[in-house]
Image (spheres, coloured by chain):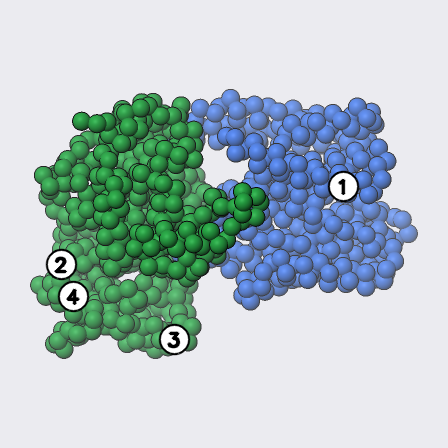
Amino acid sequence: MPLALLAIFAFFAIQSPAFLSSRNLSMLGIEVSITAVLALGMFLVILLGQIDLSAGSGVGLIGGIAAVLIFQHAWPAPAALLLSVAVAAIIWLSMGTLIVKERVPSFIITLGGLLVFRGLHWLVIDNATIPVSRGGEANFYSQLTTYYLPPLVGTLLAAVVILAIGFVSWRTFQRQKASGTAGNGEQIFLQFFVTAQLLGLFVLVCNAYRGLPLPVVVLGVVAFLIYALTTQTPFGRYLYAIGGNEEAAVVSGVPVARVTIGAFLIMGIIVAVTGFLQTAYSGASTTTVGSLMELDAVAACVIGGTSLRGGRGTVGGVLLGALIMAALLNGMTLLAVSPEAKYIARGLVLGLAVWADVRLSRRK
Amino acid sequence: MSAPLLAADRLIKRFPGVIALNGVSFDLRAGEMHALCGENGAGKSTLIKTLSGIHPAGSYEGDILVEGKIVSFRNSKDAETHGIGVIYQELALVPEMTVAENIFLGNEPRIRGGILIDWKKIYDQSKELLDRFGLNIDPAAKVNDLGIGHQQLVEIAKAMSKHTRVLILDEPTAALTEQEVAVLLDILRDLKKRGIALIYISHKLDEVFAIADRITTLRDGRSITTLEATQTTKSEVIRHMIGRPLDDLFPRRSGTAGPVILSVKDLTVMDDSKKRLEKISLEVRAGEVLGIGGLMGAGRSELLLHLFGAYGERRAGEVMLGGQALGPKHSPTESIRRGLVLVSEDRKRYGLVLDQAIGFNMALSSLQDLVRSLFGSFGLIDPNQESGRNQEHFQALRIKAPGLSTPVGTLSGGNQQKVVLAKAMMTRPKVVLLDEPTRGIDVGAKLEVYELVNKLTDAGQAVVLVSSELPELMGMSDRILMLADGRIGGLLNKAEATQENLLAAAMGNLPARNLS
């Protein structure tokens, strides 16, 4: 997959030099962040062997509710966002409960959600365009995608993150050595080295424009939390266990119902966050905001090696998958590819990527 | 003397990190029944996969010879054309297709060699084939509607349709009832009379001695001996299999029983609006093993599952664990927290997440002990504590695997069972419910399970042991509760527990004085 990403970058860089400009890479950073945040929520749901088709409509609805509260009812932005998050949490909690207690498949529940939320979204905004701030003044909502960290802060942050990743890599290596499963020190170092280089490079490029975009920081925080959740906590182990073999998980005493509902609750909060980012990026809530985003999120997971049957996948893979999907869309927009061709290309890449992955992993 | 029909000469097969075969030599004469015995992981499965072309030529060292000539199979189709057919433990039939469709699956005759399938020929030939081997099966029946025993016979017919000269059977009786086993063995004897050579793999030495001409034992990837069945004994074969004499098959050490830990009073359980258990009462004391027996469908597993909180709806009665009521509606999560743990009879379905590592599976039931209780499921797992604890149980149970990160799906049955047991032990239970804990595992691993039972009761824990093997039940239990059709058939102490009494109790025919 990293090779596919490299190929995509190379192709667009040759076709349009503007692709690698610091301005476009900053924009790409924002777009990747939005796709990836939602994909990370979807990752939890897919790990369980479930799916959330309502995520895209939810993004539109929740972003729309916040916009309406601010623009039409003059709420302060933080209060509007807080209430919207609460609404999302309640909706996803209810969907999770329905899936667990009433045993309706998540595919059906969330397919229903897709339609219901789309309708609600249009109702809430009355099929109009609702800006995220009144009279064009900046507020917390609008600044979500227009605020850039000052270069010094961005650089310092990158340094801290690189050091932290280095520390974790080193500890992983030590632990593997202690348990006798080592031998991959070079690979761990290489991974760390490449990640650190890319991160540093990205911050430098962003600093050449306006600084590190805020959504990238949001993604960093969400990715860190989801990584810790899935790899370091019982909750995360339970996700893998339920997706891998639900019956065995039940007999092993895994609280399957609570974990499933919990995963949907987290998904709801992530949908809200994505809704704010995506709506802010558009500048206003319109009927098309969030449309089909659930499919990009699923695609990012699957391209990143997450099994749709559940029980398998990593945060790193999902991030890579999101980067591929976002880079593709950004590059094609830059080349002024027609919308119909964009859809076809995204679909083909999804199919091709997964096919190649299956082929390669089978050869091993 | 003519060359053997099929022979292996000093086969060596390596997998990453493991040598599965380390010099196996073995020969099969025309028309003989040759049994392969060995513990799980001894190399039996690898040997048949090598003989049948699943591990292709070039992936192993040594030679395979058919009628004295070295052959190199590239795949299982090559082996089939040499007349070697295999029937695996997991049957390879399509449940939704008919018997005849399955027999000719992948070999469908065509109308005038064209593209249309000649259905008439399929059914006619299937009928003829089934009749020839005296199999009373309708070729138009759906495989799904047949019992597992008949499905096995369909597999045999399928193999015979390919002009098989050597038929390899891997644990063919593992899932069969005694009657079905008898039918199968008769058919195998018949095949032998028709000149077909058979390789028979089984853990059940009774069957092996009932049917085999010669017995080859494997241990740690080597062939140890090949003996004429008439000139050896079970204990000699076991000695070769485990590499030491086996003094006592059931090393139960009874101690003094402590206070009652688990008590059940007048328990009646419904499922699907049917009564599955009725008026069950029992007591289990610290340090004792309560055996539970009964015929198939008597409600043994249902009782354990209900106590654990994973089955049925309680209509009446109460369950007390450590002096406090358990249920009527409790979850397995609660049971485990209170000190009651279950090891299911179906380890692949209810015991393990097969894709995941040994360590992942071992720790799954006791992760809450590794985090600060303040954060519950969202706390951080202490990795050092986890790996230390896993390592300790990995060694204590002598799990044979490269390491804790090995996927559990790649282990042999006995080692998988040890992982499930380790997972249960790590919850530090007061009462352990064991449902057929030795099913499908070899003699050596069985012995280790029994030792574990002793260790548990020595430490003051209580064990409830469900088994359908009477010798195991009699050998390992301090008291035995027999179930008959969802009710208590009898409660017998060690002295009363003869085969006759147990069977009488299982039929519900025990004299009244024994009913408690």
Residue under pointer 1: A344
Residue A351 located left or right of residue A27: left
Query: In the rendered structure, which amino acid carries the disc numbered 3?
Result: Lys
The answer to whether residue A143 is visible is no
Q: Distance between the residues labelled 4 and 3?
A: 26 Å
Position in image of residue A119 (x %, y %) = 77, 62
Please tell me if label 2 and label 4 are on a single chain.
Answer: yes
Residue B368 located left or right of residue A336: left
Q: Residue B274 carries which label?
A: 3
Taking depth in this image into account, of A109 and B183 the one nearest to the observer is: B183
| 2 or 3: tag closer to the N-terminus | 2
Please tell me if label 1 and label 2 are on a single chain.
Answer: no
Please tell me if label 4 and label 3 are on a single chain.
Answer: yes
Residue under pointer 2: B256
Q: Residue furthest right?
A: A135
Query: In the rendered structure, which amino acid carries the disc numbered 2?
Result: Thr
- Chain A as rendered: colour: blue
Give residue A281's quadrant in the image: top right
Question: Neighbour class for label 3 at 10 Å: few (<14), some, many (≥20)?
Answer: few
